[in-house]
Amino acid sequence: MQSERDAKARHRQSVETSLKNSTRFNVQLFRETGSFGHGTGVRNYCDVDLLASMSSMNGYQPTSDTALLWVKDTLRASFPATAVQIRRPTVAIMFANGAEKWEILPGFRTSPADDVPVYNIPGPASGWMSSAPTVHLEYVNEVNQRDGIRGGAKKLARLAKAWKYFNQVPISSFYLEMRAARYLEVQTSFQPFVHLCGYLEWLNEIQLADMNDPKGRASRFAACSSTATRASALPKLRTATSRARKSADAEYAGDTSTAFHYLGLLFAGVFPRR
């Protein structure tokens, strides 16, 4: 991961400079969010998420579509040879022909300066939703550091994201991470593949239901960007649940070979290796 961090860090200043020079909006600060700097990323699937806390030149908050368009047009003007696309809720800029991807999230702060930062960010399909990124990161860290769990929340999140990426499951990585922390919040220990099985079974039981902000500072958030993507994700989740259970049962029975066989299927043959 360090090599990825070094490579991606080289573009941060140019991206920030581009947005700061915009004539359409002002940027108060940049805040790195998501898995890249949080220890929950999957190698070669970890993008840089950068929240741009901004305001319009005339002081009003535009529509979320307009805010995304402003960011896209600004980056395109600065990087004419680089692909820049709106991919709600962010604007994605693909350096090195897509090998290095940054996702820029426009945010308009709604909380007082002396309170926890809460932002309006683009919703997954339309409109605005509220988000408290620092609170969300702190929540995962709190669970991750609990006795008996030590490191488990982030490990479980990485396993869930690896399953998602390797099987092309259209579920939000943020949702998987927050649900992983919520699942382990009531556990007293952590065993990676035992709890991965339980976690996937739980997601299947609740049918990827929307999740309340665990700290009560922001909007409920969805697992998928639309009804259609959720309908696509659920069958893949059911298959994953079956494979994870067969792997766990085989391990309990002392049949390590069969356990690894189903783990291989679970992770589309990419992981784990013996």
Image: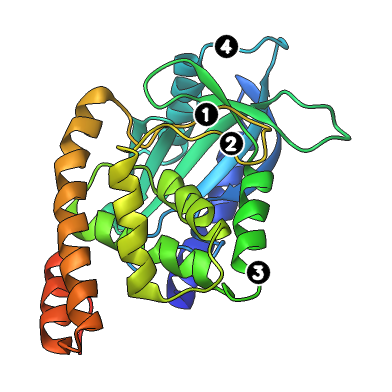
Q: Residues within 10 Å of mark 2 (few under 14, many from 20)?
A: some
Q: Residues within 10 Å of mark 1 (few under 14, many from 20)?
A: some
Which badge, 1 or 3, is on the more N-terminal residue? 3
* Kind of residue sitting beneath label 4: Pro
Residue under numbered circle 4: 62
Mark 1–mark 3 distance (CA, rounded to whole Å): 25 Å
**Residue mark closest to the camera, 1 vs 3:** 3
Picture residue at 61% right of the left edge, 37% below the top:
52
Residue 269 in view, yes or no: no
> Split into 4 quadrants, where in the image is the C terminus?
bottom left
Residue under numbered circle 1: 220
Question: Relative to the observer, which residue lies in front, 68 or 273?
Answer: 273
Q: Is residue 96 left or right of residue 233?
A: right
Q: Residues within 10 Å of mark 3 (few under 14, many from 20)?
A: some
State if disc 2 and disc 1 touch (CB < 8 Å): yes
Question: Relative to the observer, which residue lies in front, 57 or 237?
Answer: 237
Q: Is residue 113 left or right of residue 208?
A: right
